[in-house]
Amino acid sequence: MSATATFASRAGCAAEIPPEMDAVAFARRCLRFEPDAKQQEVLLAAGPRTIVNTSRMWGKSTIAAVRALHWAWTKPQQTVALVSARRADSVDLMRLTRKLARELGAAGKAGPRLELGRGSQIMARAGGDGPVAGADLTIVDDAARVSDEAFAALRPAAAMGKGPLLLLSTPRDHSGFFYEIWEQDRSDAWVKIQATAEECVRLPEEFLKEERKRLGEIPFWKTYMCNYDDEKVRPKIYAGWVDEPGGEFMDGPWGYEEEYWKDREMPEGHTLKKEWTARAEAKARAEAEALAQAQAKNDEQDR
């Protein structure tokens, strides 16, 4: 297909988009982007508040850009706010949005604002730059890195626009608004979607094995398996029985073994129990030998 024909095809798609076209169909037909099953779930999330806890390298920024373009392109007189933690991230996110917008023939000029047809626009902001007042859709990319202060300013502005609020991030610290909403908010106010590395077909198994070895278990489970609760991970590391005869317990330089088992009963046959029992017996023998040598020395001096 020639470049002219390709451009004509894209322009035809742009001109024919019905307002009821959903974001998945829009991504496929107009942006030539095929979202995976979990990405489709995020694109179609219809609640007023959605939080997405994702693996690293899942495609958060791409989904943020697709969702923004769909909203602004299919609805007139709309303002979409794309919020990032840092200004450099904001620039990168708008650059990605413009790249996708070329499929619509609407990349526009460089800058933090992308103007689309029928009076709609997408505005990219860093969290510290203040909110976009009255935004009809607010998307926060890499939300766990946005400060609580920036989010506190963002929420009233999003509420004024009466539009949806979408948070996307990989887990980071055990604090902050993203952590609190994901882990502690038990209300129905938020639609919660989790997308782990195992659900991402673009992340090869061999790569994940390398990352697991490089990072260690707990950081890997947080970064790639969307896990905030270390206590759920530690049993997977330390409490594992050896199912196969001759199998080895998955040990390593975790530094949590004694802490984990301090107040727990270790099952018989556990590799660590055997190791620690042998270590304790060796220590007892060494102490007994040292005591015997000291006693023998004292006896010799008494003579």
Image (tube, grey):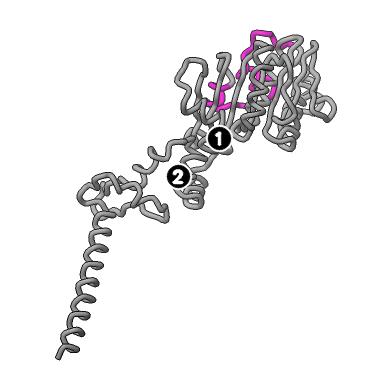
Q: Is residue 148 magenta?
A: no
Kindly give the residue lying farthest to the right in the view shown: 109
Horizontal side of residue 161 vs 246, given as left or right: right
The C terminus - image quarter: bottom left
Residue under the image location 47 percent in, 37 percent down: 225
Spatial CA span between label 1 and label 2? 14 Å
**Disc 2: which residue:** 218
Q: Is residue 119 above or below residue 276?
A: above
Q: Position of residue 166 (x, y in %)?
A: 60, 22
Q: Quadrant of residue 33?
A: top right
- Residue 128 screen position, x and y as percent: 72, 31
Dot 1 or dot 2, earlier in sequence? 1
Q: Is residue 174 visible?
A: yes
The answer to which quarter of the image holds residue 67 is top right
> Element under label 2?
helix
- Name which residue type carries label 1: Thr
Q: Is residue 14 left or right of residue 187?
A: right
Q: Position of residue 9 (x, y in %)?
A: 75, 20
Q: Nearer the viewer, residue 91 or 303?
A: 303
Residue 111 is situated, as x and y percent measured from the top left of the image, at 82, 29
Residue found at x 36% / y 46%: 237
- Element at badge 1? loop
Residue tagged by mark 1?
A: 170
Q: The magenta stretch spans which residues? A: 16-42
